Amino acid sequence: MGINHHFEHLLKRHQLKRTEARLRVLNLLVNKKTATSQPDLESVIGDVDRVTLYRILNAFEEKGIIHKVFDLNGTANYAICSSDCDEHHHNDEHLHFNCSNCKNVYCLDELDMPPIVLPAGFKLEKLSFSATGLCPKCANKE
């Protein structure tokens, strides 16, 4: 199955119309090793206007295709969700690593996160794990 066919299937599964702009955004996000901000996407996507891109990102987040994580400056960045995310539950409870040098945000899915047991009466709605330090590339420069 080609990558475009995979993206078309993903859009169909989430009841989203197939558009070239949506396919291009998916392709960009899947091929990035880091979470990506809307301004960064705007700079490489070119002919998709800001409002359309915002709507695409919003729809993808609502449907569980991408998740939002904030960088050290408070800017929203987006990354592809795991395949078991949907519009009712995001399974993005992994470590988000912010590099203090290059400012990239990495989703470290491979780490096992400890279970969170809240005291009686608390109801968890969203959980976020983040860490700050140097990514391997920046750490090797020092």
Image (spheres, grey):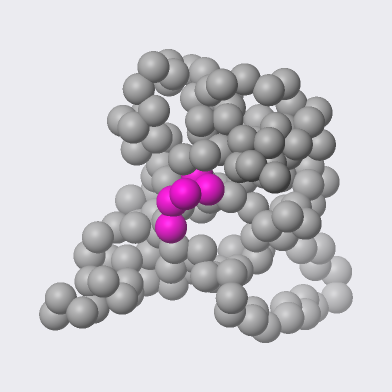
Q: Residue furthest right?
A: 120
The quadrant of the picture occupied by the N terminus is: top right
Residue occupying the point 72% across, 21% down: 17
Farthest left residue in view: 142
Q: Residue at x 27, y 66 (%)?
A: 100
Per the rendered image, the range of residues in magenta is 29-33
Q: Is residue 102 left or right of residue 90?
A: left
Image location of residue 2, percent across then percent down? 64, 42
Residue at figure coordinates x 64%, y 79% from the top left: 113
Report if residue 85 is visible in the image: yes
Place of residue 54 in the rendered image (x, y in percent of width and height, measured from the top left): 51, 26
* Figure check: 55 above or below 26: above
Q: Is residue 63 left or right of residue 104?
A: right
Q: How many marks?
A: 0
Q: Identify which residue is drawn at 34% across, 38% down.
A: 40
Residue 134 lies in the magenta-colored region: no
Q: Is residue 68 above or below residue 95?
A: above
The percent coordinates of residue 86 (x first, y second) are 78, 47
Q: Is residue 74 left or right of residue 107?
A: left
Residue closest to the eye, 38 or 8: 8
Instruction: Specify the principal SS of the magenta part.
Output: helix
In this rendering, position of residue 125 left or right of residue 30: right
Check residue 32 for magenta coloring.
yes
